[in-house]
Every structure is written in C-alpha cells, then in structure tokens.
Image (cartoon, rainbow, N blue to C red):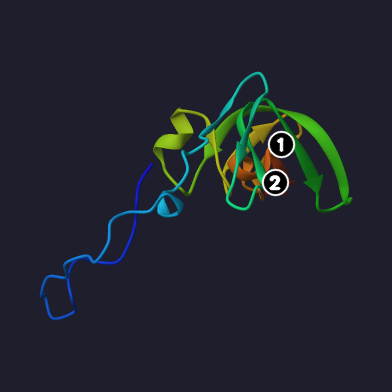
C-alpha cells in the first residue's frame, strides 16, 4: 500500500509543511497481481459499503472475435506481452492491455481483472 498526496515542495522550491497527517481514505488498496492458475477470487469492501471482486488467479478468459462478433470462454496458455510492466510477462501477471496466448490465438485484455473479477479479451487478427 502506498500513500500519495500533495508535493512537499512549492513550485519555487520552498518547503511546504503539512497541516495534517495521512488519512485512511487516502491509502490505496493492495494490488491483485492476477496470475495464471486455478481460479481464486477475493471480495474486498470499498468506501461507501460497496464490494469489489479481486481476481487473484484464473486460467480462463472470455474472448470476443471481432470478425464474427462471437464470445467464447477459452483457456489461457501464457502471457506474451504487457505494456504496463515488462517483468509481468515472465511472472504471467494479467493486467489491462496484456497480450495473452489462448487456445484460439492471441488476444488483448480489455478489462481490469484485479478490479472486476474476470478476464475479458478481444482476439487479435493474425497477419499471416
């Protein structure tokens, strides 16, 4: 968890002394780091009494084929690319924008699995 707030410096370079300390509502949540494997979900309470479903592990994705407009539930084989962090590829961490290799081809993840509890993707048309 980390806390982010205003800068401790003015634009002139002078120091700003904070008038108050940190507040609990300003603290961010723990990252889900969705891995490949047997499905594990965790429910987390959020501000306002709502719930979020954190997807910790999953081996399937709902993939949409843009040509036929069909959605299929397919098995994920591996993570082949991740613009968020290059090190997520070797650790098989799935985030929004990740490129995953599935049974029916490569697909790009279009949702946030750590926030929504599922993996949705769009099939990338092969250039062969």
Q: Quadrant of the N terminus?
A: top left
> Quadrant of the rendered structure where residue 79 is?
top right
Secondary structure of residue under mark 2:
loop
Q: Nearer the viewer, mark 1 or mark 2?
A: 1
Horizontal relation, residue 79 to residue 70: left or right:
left
In the image, 20 versus 37, the foreground residue is 20
Q: Which residue is mark 2?
A: 126
Horizontal relation, residue 29 to residue 120: left or right:
left
In the image, 119 versus 78, the foreground residue is 119
Q: Which residue is mark 1?
A: 105
Residue pictured at 30% horizontal, 66% vertical: 6
Q: Earlier in the sequence, mark 1 or mark 2?
A: 1
In the image as oriented, which residue stretches furthest toward the bottom? 12
x, y percentage for residue 42?
62, 30
What is the CA distance from the residue labelled 1 to the residue labelled 2?
Answer: 8 Å
Question: Would you say the residues marked 1 and 2 are in contact, meaning their CB atoms lie under 8 Å apart?
Answer: yes
> Quadrant of the rendered structure where residue 78 is?
top right
Secondary structure of residue under mark 1:
strand
x, y percentage for residue 44?
60, 37
- The image shows residue 125, relative to residue 53, as above or below, that is below
């Amino acid at each position: 968890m980390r806390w982010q707030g205003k800068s401790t410096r003015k634009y002139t370079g002078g120091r700003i002394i904070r008038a108050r300390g940190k507040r609990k509502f300003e603290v961010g949540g723990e990252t889900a780091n969705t891995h490949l494997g047997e499905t594990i979900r965790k429910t987390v309470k959020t501000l306002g009494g709502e719930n979020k479903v954190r997807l910790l592990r999953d081996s399937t994705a709902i993939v949409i084929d843009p040509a036929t407009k069909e959605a299929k539930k397919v098995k994920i084989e591996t993570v082949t690319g991740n613009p968020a962090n290059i090190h997520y590829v070797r650790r098989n961490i799935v985030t929004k924008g990740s490129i995953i290799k599935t049974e029916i081809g490569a697909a790009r993840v279009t949702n946030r699995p750590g926030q929504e509890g599922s993996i949705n993707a769009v099939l990338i048309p092969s250039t062969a």
